[in-house]
Image (cartoon, rainbow, N blue to C red):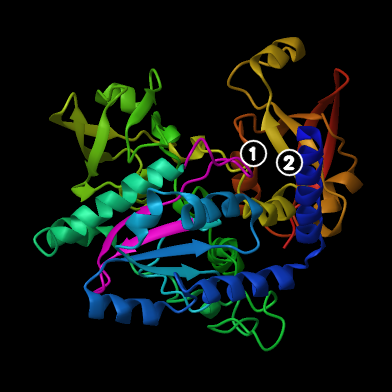
Amino acid sequence: MMSRIATVALLTLLSLLNFCDAQTREEKVRSDRKRVVAEGFWIYNDLPKAFEEAKKTGKPIVVVLRCLPCEECVKLDDDLVDQDPIVRPLLKKFVCARQVSTNGLDLSLFQYDTDQSFAVFFLNADGTIYGRFGTRSHRTEWVQDVSISGLAEALRGALELHGDYPNNKSSLAGKRGSPPLFPSPEKFPSLKGKFTDSLNYKGNVTKSCIHCHQIGDAVREYYHSNGKKIPKDVFYPYPHPKTVGWTLDPNTSATLREVAKGSSADKAGFRTGDTITSLNGQPILSSADIQWVLHHLAPEGGTVLASVRRSEKPHKLQLTVEDGWREQGDLSWRVSTWGLVGKASGGLRLEPLSEEDRAKQEIENGKMALRVTYVGKYGTHSAAKKAGFRKNDVIISVDGKTDLVTEGAFLEYGVNERKIGDRISATVLRNKKRITMKIPIQK
């Protein structure tokens, strides 16, 4: 009997999966809108309505920026909306708004890591930001960075800040950064004329949508197309806390699960178990808040002031970020690197060689040793393949340089230091033989 029930359950699950797979992107977006609007819990793609509702009710606002259809963020989003018994009651204390596109988005207010496909903002009706939630450091895995418990903690923290508002207004003022290059995504030169400030549900809605990562693409293209170097903070955006030595417990607001030995955080005196309560005077609700401060307020060789709770007692610490700290971040998971790969490496994806493999190849530590993990096949991403590159080639120098030890450094050199039409000379190790090939820098 039990095996029959299990079989029926499995067949039902498979039929649902097949139905989801059979749905086109257009159908998924439209069905999501229909379902959410019918439920009536979330205000769907109408931020002005959410702010107006917050003014009437006195509630804070929670805005979820969610890419559709993104199967990875659905895992978290559907749980928090439909299933979790702790989060749902907390959400009822907010005006809840779901935004599934960035068309018309106020970029002076909504500043976040645009390589995310799931980002949350907690706000007052007057536009004051209480905090943010949503962090990712892998293309598909999210459990190491966010959790339902962590979201609940952020919601509670936002409610506490809202309850004390406006007494705490001065401490929240710094949560809005400098004005963006353009006020909203569709006004960037590379997006202007292709998109409007709203989705086109009367036509092809998916083609009318500006995705989060396209904002980052547009920022980089603005500099590149104007013959300017892409700034460090644009090339290496929203550094993960690990770049300074912090590994956070995703089930908490900002409690340190680990402090890397020898890191900036270790040198500053941070300890495992510390809870970061503020950075540069800003209340911290999650790792996304930490990333915002690191991105906007942590200069090369500069300092960030931190308040931590340690064994229920407050402590003040000063984090000094070292020169080149941003470059330590991993860019490989970011969707936005795909365009840079086409421009600078001709379609190659690269990863540093392990210490064991370095020893086998007799490559000195600290010198360039980037293994080719992927060779593109189409369009601009086929240039390296046409030049003769193969998977598992190990690049040991570029134009005689041996200090480009990460994929990011390789891409940054190609985009910022060489011009379109140039050909960089790369030396690779293949079967213990050295081969030199040239990769064109492309538009």
Indicate left or right for 441 with 334 as reference: right
> Residues at badges 2 and 1 in contact (C-beta under 8 Å)?
yes
Q: Secondary structure at mark 2?
A: strand
Q: Residue at x 65, y 81 (%)?
A: 194
Between residues 105 and 81, which one lies in front from this camera angle?
81
Q: Relative to 399, say whether 85 is above or below.
A: below
Q: Is residue 93 left or right of residue 313?
A: right
Along the line of sight, the residue nearer the viewer: 274 or 152: 152
Label 1 Cα neighbours within 10 Å, binned few <14 / some 14-19 / many ≥20: many
For residue 349, the mark is: 2
The amino acid type found where label 1 is placed reads Glu
N-terminal-most mark, 2 or 1: 2
Residue 413 seen anywhere in this rendered image of the structure:
yes
Is residue 130 one of those drawn in magenta? Answer: yes
Please report the residue visible at 41 percent of the width from the left and 74 percent of the height from the top.
106
Q: Which residues are magenta?
A: 119-146
Overall secondary structure of the magenta section: loop
Q: Give above or below for 105 relative to 69.
A: below
On the rendered image, what quadrant is the N terminus found in? top right
Task: Provide residue 443's location: percent of width, then percent of height.
Answer: 72, 63
Query: Residue 378 in the image: x percent, y percent?
Result: 86, 56
Pointer 1 residue? 407
